[in-house]
Image: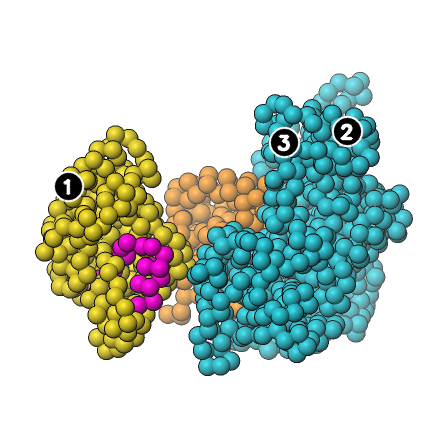
Amino acid sequence: MPEFRPRIVAFVCNWCTYAGADLTGTSRMKYSPQVSIIRFPCTGRIDFMLLLKAFANGADGIIVSGCHPNDCHYSSGNFHARRRWIVFRALLDFLGIDVRRIQFSWVSAAEGAKWARLVNETAERIHGLGPFTDYHRLRGMGVE
Amino acid sequence: MTLARIGVFVCHCGENISATVDCAKVAAEAAKLPGVAHSVDYKYMCSDPGQQLIQSAIREKGLTGVVVAACSPRMHEPTFRRACAEAGLNPFLCEMANIREHCSWVHEKGEATTAKALDIVRTLVAKVKKGKPLQPIQVPVTKTALVLGGGIAGIQASLDIANAGHRVILVEKEPSIGGHMAQLSETFPTLDCSQCILTPRMVEVAQHPNITLYSYSELEGLEGFIGNFKARIRRKARGLDETLCTGCGLCTQKCPTRRIPSEFDAGLGLRPAIYVPFPQAVPNKPVIDRDHCTYFLKGKCRLCEKVCPTQAIRFDQEDEIVEAEVGAVVLATGFDIKHGDFFPEYGYGRFQDVIDGLQFERLASASGPTLGEIRRPSDGKVPETVVFVACAGSRDPAKGIEYCSKICCMYTAKHAMLYKHKVHQGKPFVFYMDIRAGGKMYEEFVRRAMEEDGVQYVRGRVSRIYERGGKLVVKGADTLLGARPLEIEADLVVLATAAVANAGAEDLAQKLHVSYDAHAFFAEAHPKLRPVETNTAGIFLAGACQAPKDIPDSVSQASGAAAKVAALFSRSELVREPLVAVVDRQAPPVYSSCVGCFLCQGACPYQAIEKEEIRNRDGGLIKTVAKVNPGLCQGCGTCVALCRTKSIDIQGYSHEQVYAEVLALLNRGEGDA
Amino acid sequence: MRTGFYPGCSMKGSAREYNESLMAVAAALGRDLPEVPDWNCCGATAAHNLDRDLSLALPARILAAAEKEGMNEVLVPCAACYSRLKTTRHELNEDEALRRRIAGLVEAPYEGSAEVVNIIEWLGRIPDLEGRVKKPFARKVACYYGCLLVRPAGVVRFDRPEEPQSMDRLMKKLGADPIDWAFKTECCGAGFSVSRTDLVAKLSGLILEDAVSRGAEAVIVACPMCHLNLDMRRPNIEKRAGKKYRIPVMYITQALGLALGLAPRKLGLQRHKVSPSALIVPASAQSAAGSQFASGDSPASAPSSGSSAGSPAATAKKVD
């Protein structure tokens, strides 16, 4: 059996976490290559249906990360994301998705090291949880 | 939809990418992606030939979109979009796949890294395929600059902008402009008097026809965006009518409450409750300190009112809020030094004769509480032995301050020198970690302190300072003499305490939506190439609010920021990226899928969503739907995620684009279904 | 909250009076202090000089035993033991893989749930200690923290490492007047007590000299090793300094016991090399001070040393 290499999608905001991940690069810190970033203007832009879409299409884990509270480039987008996450989290059980597969976090533009740590910890955790195989069920629920 | 013809351009970035990513393979694999018509790799894509490679491909192959797989879009997106636009491709159909910061630099060489690079390229190809040509938005520019902070950086920026012919509003929270520089005695490395070179500039600010000075004022809030900010400024009540006050100073002489520690003298001198911080203050108008004024505390006195020859005193004056429209903001709010019980091991705050650098400046200043004589605070004696401790708090991870405060090596050398010049028999010692004297004539200056003025430099740190028999025992080690423990009995100790961000820096940053670092210094847009800009367009940085800086550096950066503002103001209209939200519009009888719930309106931080009434020919209301004002929208997209009918979308990060990205990243094909 | 008690070797040997006074004080305050069952050596200086795993496994076993007993915290009065237990808890909580490995070594589940507290923390939490004081300890005292109670700061996260205040605050509650002095956290010579007595004589001598020169009447400690060096090594200190030091060294629990009105003998005060008898106020003088305090005066207004309580010489009482 081939070794399990998790696929993790990171939904990040342009101003804090994307820049923080850039800093990880300029600082040459190493982290797991199993995470790829999709850039959004703000975590407030992230429609959480996208997370389900990702799970339904083979993602094993997801990171959502933006600016720290009060540091949002657009004042309050990250608060919207946080509220949305609280509601969404309650639905995960119903959907049969282990809450540990989603990592919600704040990483600022100055926190390159934190980004590396976040990715590695998430990758390790998802590795421990194994592949997400229930995506057929999600599709049955109308998520494609 | 027209058939996509996407070009993929994979950059080696010298070896920055190609050392860990197989660029040729990425290009070859990308060529196989559906819709990719052209795919190549090249050593330096951002170079002139690299850009030409892209431009000729656009022209010759008729590309409908471009993906440049290279560094972060935060680095070169504008470069490549401009190149595409020159070749006739809509710039918003050019996307960057970040395979350097997010891939080659953070992973080891190997197949997984190359595979990830390809994943990223595939994701951006999918995005650009769903992209739409967008037209930039034109917005007018208000040619007035708001400068926050009236220290040397703010003064310089204000004068430069004003001299370029633009209006400036300078806001200073203290009663006078001048900042820390006004407190300094002499300046390194020339030892010219700080006030002598500063005060003419202060006067120039006050008299400049283009500059409006709001001293004793603070920014309440800032709304809007580059070219079109709206600032609310709180003018704190001075307690007098400035138009009547002549600055004669009679009130400050007669005030009976006279024993308040002077902020300007760093607590070493005293001032009355109605005061001008220092004689050369600009504006030279007093302020009533309501926390100490007898009238405000006990309800009677009003002596100043009685003696004022122009009846200018106004006890009932209240704070006033001024609104101003500005096109750009320069942040020049400066720095502070560490105070208080941050150094319990040094007894700073407990022992009167352990002072900080700013306090020593006041002791050495001819206008200071001792009129320039070096006398220690406890008993006024001239100290025979003075120990200067450099790096007090700086470069000390245990104290939570890892950075170098940059100015201390130089001012400590200056202090030791000034002491020696004033007390010839005195014995100055400097404890240091390293001497950092990079700068024109700086190293020479430190050498002079050591060799000509006989300042004893001891390489080592001080572990503890305590009082014993009227002396301060300084325990340290001389690491150049075999870590020999050293005890010096000093009469005065001067700590070069760490330079830190101002107490309100974090709040201000949040008000302005600019980034700041872990120490609350404001963050520049790029550490090397955009050092005077913030990540928020139209807001610029000058001076020590960005990082500890000396006077020449602060002045240079201030002029840099002023040049940026002047460039911005050289146009009457500004082009903004059209990455804004739009509400669905359709032909009758649907008009729009928007159902008019206006959840979006409540969520929008910019009040950019308006109600639009759709009426029939007779003027009868058909429906009310949302409409985005593109001039106000900043493109955060909060409304997009919130909209229940998916009627709002955001250009550049549309539903179609992000869904396609997710599917492509997971290698699930087109996602057109 | 269930607090367990880890005595370690000192409390049962060289620092018997620390143990006696702690037990007496706990009883007077109505606190139950059950020992961690089947406790073992903390590893002291030896283990972490020899073998890192051993230095972590020994304290981990103690903490695992406490957890098994349902204790949420363990009181460790010896500063050296405290340092070992606290360090172990810190390192294992920071590193999950290490935690698993060490738990395997000691063959017991270690979760890191039990907190490790020192004597100052524990006493500092007792509500209204001032109100329980019967005989204010109205003396000028030098609170000596030593090295391990507050360091390394990142591990113990207790008080300020450079200029700690917690013991001073505690002593103020007992009516004492803690001096501002320079040697609060300077080294006493520690484990060199046996091998380099000359060093101990020098370092501990500096501590006593500074305390005495600032008018302290007693040095208050919270560490058996500090006590040993400052008290038992007094002849060596005096020989080196060429002068006598009469200042007694007391455990914080002994000072507290006296303030609570407990009998000196119950607090083991007779066991010291340097007798603290001069500090023990006769019952008659004390009851006056005590009632004055009980009538609602703040401890600060309690009589300062040598005033109503009389001079130390006059109040000296034989306790041996």
Q: Nearer the viewer, residue C129 or C202?
A: C202
Residue in the picture at 36% in, 52% down: C179
Amino acid type at image mark 1:
Ala
Discs 1, 3 touching: Cβ within 8 Å? no
Chain assigned yellow: C
- Cβ atoms at labels 3 and 2 below 8 Å apart: no
Whole-percent x and y of residue A53?
51, 49
Q: Which mark is residue B243?
A: none
Q: Quadrant of residue C147?
A: bottom left
Q: Position of residue B287 (x, y in %)?
A: 71, 36
Task: Kindly identify which residue carries mark 3.
Answer: B293
Residue corresponding to mark 2: B308
Asked whether residue B295 appears in the rendered view, the answer is: yes
Q: Chain of mark 1?
A: C
Residue C69 placement, left or right of C139: left
Nearer to me, B673 or C54: C54
Query: Which residue was labeled with disc 1?
Result: C283
